[in-house]
Amino acid sequence: MPRLFSGIEIPAEIAERLIVLRGGLEGARWVDPQNYHITLRFIGDVDGSTAERFSEALADIAAPPFSLTLDGLGSFGRGRPRAVWAGVASCNELSALNRAHENAAIRAGIEAESRNFHPHVTLARMRGAKADDVATYLSYNGAFLSAAFPVTRFVLFSSRESRGGGPYVVERAYPLDGGED
Ligand code: ATP
Ligand code: MG
């Protein structure tokens, strides 16, 4: 069964800025820069016909291109940090695109997502890293701000079956050229 999620790719010039943030945190496994992405809708392991329905529902999305900025670093998992990420500056078009992906998932018969959308680029995953070390890392690096970059397509990614993780494969790409006139 394929393991799927939809998302946005990170352009090379932005990835180059993120590469500088790798290192300096004990217990962190730094994400390979070729795997940087923003998840729009995590699907997980699904059967082929669900995958096909989701892929087709994504193709019906009409949305315009827009631009994004990465603004600030943060972490998930307070006492036991699990990930360090770069956040995405608030963007109405991105929120609308996430809602469209949620609708596509529902039309494909996938269970609704109950968690809030928190767009981010995961930079490192960790097990056993100290919360204090993460706080120190963030105090040095947390003010990160990228240049704005254009988002001209979203993609359907697959990750490793049942286990997750990269390298992620672009199964299908969807250009952004629709939306309001
Ligand atoms: P690993 O789990 O091995 O660290 P991964 O998390 O990158 O790898 P997947 O588990 O396939 O690989 O996840 C793909 C993407 O979806 C990642 O961006 C991940 O953060 C995100 N994701 C995974 N599970 C969920 C979930 N339950 N809700 C929202 N996003 C998720
Ligand atoms: Mg995972």
Image (cartoon, helix red, strand yellow):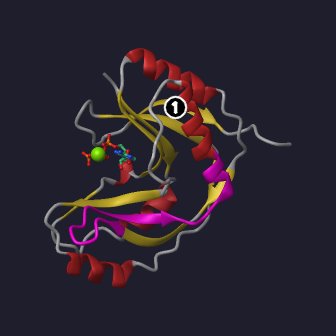
Q: Quadrant of the C terminus?
A: top right
In terms of image quarters, where does ligand 1 lie? top left
Q: State yes or no: Cβ of the residue under disc 1 lies below 8 Å from any atom of ligand 1.
A: no
Give the residue at x 56% y 26%: 107
Give coordinates of residue 9: x percent, y percent. 49, 47
Quadrant position of residue 17 = bottom left
Residue matched to label 1: 105
Find residue 45 and report its horizontal and vertical position in percent: 32, 29
Q: Which residues are magenta?
A: 75-96
Q: Quadrant of residue 18?
A: bottom left
Q: Is residue 59 left or right of residue 51?
A: right
Q: Quadrant of the N terminus?
A: top left
Total labels drawn: 1
Indicate yes or no whether the magenta region holds residue 95: yes
Judged left or right of residue 127, residue 9 is right
Residue pictured at 75% horizontal, 37% vertical: 178
Image location of residue 172, percent across then percent down: 51, 28
Residue 54, given in percent of the width and then of the height, sits at 51, 26
Q: Is residue 109 magenta?
A: no
Vertically, is 134 above or below 97? below
Establish if 98 lies above or below 141.
above
Farthest-out residue, top: 49
Query: Which residue sits at x=70%, y=41%?
Result: 63
Characterize the local packing of mark 1: few (<14), some (14-19) or many (20 or more) Cα atoms within 10 angstroms: many
Q: Helix, strand, or loop for circle 1? A: helix
Q: Amino acid at mark 1?
A: Ala
Give the left or right position of residue 114, taking residue 160 as reference.
right
| 127 on left or right of 103 | left
- Say above or below: 144 vs 8: below
> Dividing the picture into quarters, in which one does residue 44 lie?
top left
- Nearer to me, 105 or 120: 105
Q: Residue at x 17, y 69 (%)?
A: 129
